[in-house]
Amino acid sequence: MALSETGTNHFKNYIAGEWIEGDSQVENINPSDTRDVVGLAVRSGGADLDRAIDAAHDAAPGWARSTPQQRYDILDAVGNEIIARKDELGRLLSREEGKTLAEGIGEVVRAGQVFKFFAGEAVRLPGERLDSIRPGVEVDMRREPMGVIGMITPWNFPIAIPAWKIAPALAYGNAVVLKPAELVPGSAWALAEILSRSGLPEGVFNLVAGRGSELGPRMIENPKVRAISFTGSVPTGRGIAAACGEHLKKVQLEMGGKNPLVVLDDADLDVAVGAALNGAFFSTGQRCTASSRLVVSEGIHDRFVSALTEKLKTLVVGDALDPKTQMGPVVDEKQLEQDLSYVEIAGQEGGKLAIGGERLTLEKPGFYMAPALFTETSNDMRINREEVFGPVASVIRVKDYEEALHVANDTSFGLSSGICTTSLKYASDFKQKSEAGMVMVNLPTAGVDYNVPFGGTKGSSFGSREQGRYAVEFYTTVKTAYTQP
């Protein structure tokens, strides 16, 4: 099925090797130009989901017995096609989600790289053999697929996050049912379309679009689904964890962040400002790894705020597909209203708005917002406790490194953290004592590699890590076999 880069596309379900209509259709709107309908996406009910789960359940045993070479060949071919079509798919992604075209293309490449990485993992699935404590007995430990994996993915990385869930699931011999975010059906559909031609047996991969509030609980309650991988909000994640516990399902959750970027007096100012600008405002701040709390020591505070404010004055906000744009729109009206409400809340709590924070009216009708920077905030303010998920950052002034470390760790989240310093002593101490799953030194808190684990602590993550070779922990179970020769 052809993908239109300018006209309206039709995004269907993919179940048991067939493209299927849903119960109804919803419009997929371009946030850069609300007059542009990217596509018409199906909205499915429980019957379609049940059919997809049945198909995956029927296909899972055969796929589990496939050879590592079969899995390698399919995943590597999928990765190659994604990368070869990076411009086309990146344009679709940016058109429906709103991140800049460069960011959209970069995300597509990342998705392709993930598939190619897990193609390699398919042929090096680890096992172990030990001598038993009983004479003459051999013990083998091997990893086996879980079976059917249910996946619920968010709108902010509409091809990369599905990729880094689907690829390891298939590499380790599982069948998949994917429920993507309703706001961004096109990228998931495009990925499904590539998978549909990859040589996968019918039913091994299935795509069902619809409301998460309806399909999510039904997926969890179905006994044929052995595990759930979810990326999204903390409240939803907590509900999924509780439900999976009730049904004794394996669960993996990636949720929110309120990530600190510490800037010490000895930091290189240009490096610090660059890290803050990228981490807080690129991808319109719509990243769980965004640096929304800028914890700055008093000796560099004023220079840092002034330099960052000057950078924000020149940041070009506009149509995601315009090559001049440096920050695209917010994803939709609801998210924009939430972002603006936090700007109001921060002001009411005593924060000083240094720049931005207003809705922008540009040539094209869209969900545009001027990036907002607050100063004179404290860590107990809502702006520093709750995830905004937009282009809004706040500065917290601290006396020294010790106070900065305390403030950085004083949060219910623990996904990513960063420090800008030229001191090896402080950098080493922060890497050890930061209560986050990922720590960056002189780098933005957002931006990670596909070949290493991704995940956090506290309220940010639950269960096994995603990505890299650590993904095997979630997508497989261990069998121990004893043999008396």
Image: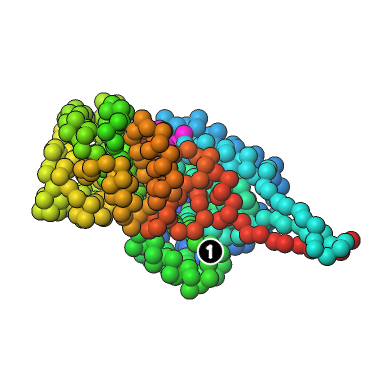
The amino acid at mark 1 is Lys
Q: Is residue 146 left or right of residue 386?
A: right
Q: Residue furthest bottom?
A: 246
Identified at 45% across, 32% down, the residue is 86
Q: Is residue 87 left or right of residue 60?
A: left
Q: How is the image coloured?
A: rainbow
Work out whether residue 98 can be spotted: no
Q: What residue would you read off at disc 1?
A: 250
Mark 1, other Cα within 10 Å: few <14 / some 14–19 / many ≥20: some
Tell me residue 447's x, y (percent): 40, 38
Tell me residue 378's x, y (percent): 19, 50
Kind of element beneath mark 1? strand
Along the line of sight, the residue nearer the viewer: 89 or 196: 89
The answer to which quarter of the image holds residue 214 is: bottom left
Along the line of sight, the residue nearer the viewer: 45 or 473: 473
Q: Is residue 259 left or right of residue 116?
A: left
Work out whether residue 397 can be spotted: yes
- In the rendered image, the quadrant that contains the C terminus is bottom right
Q: Is residue 249 left or right of residue 212?
A: right
Q: Main secondary structure of the magenta part?
A: helix
Q: In the rendered structure, does residue 329 fall within the stretch colored magenta? A: no
Identified at 15% across, 51% down, the residue is 346
Residue 382 drawn above or below residue 124: below
How many numbered marks does the figure carry?
A: 1
| Chain part drawn in magenta | 102-109
Along the line of sight, the residue nearer the viewer: 458 or 474: 458
Along the line of sight, the residue nearer the viewer: 216 or 394: 394
Identified at 68% across, 43% down, the residue is 123
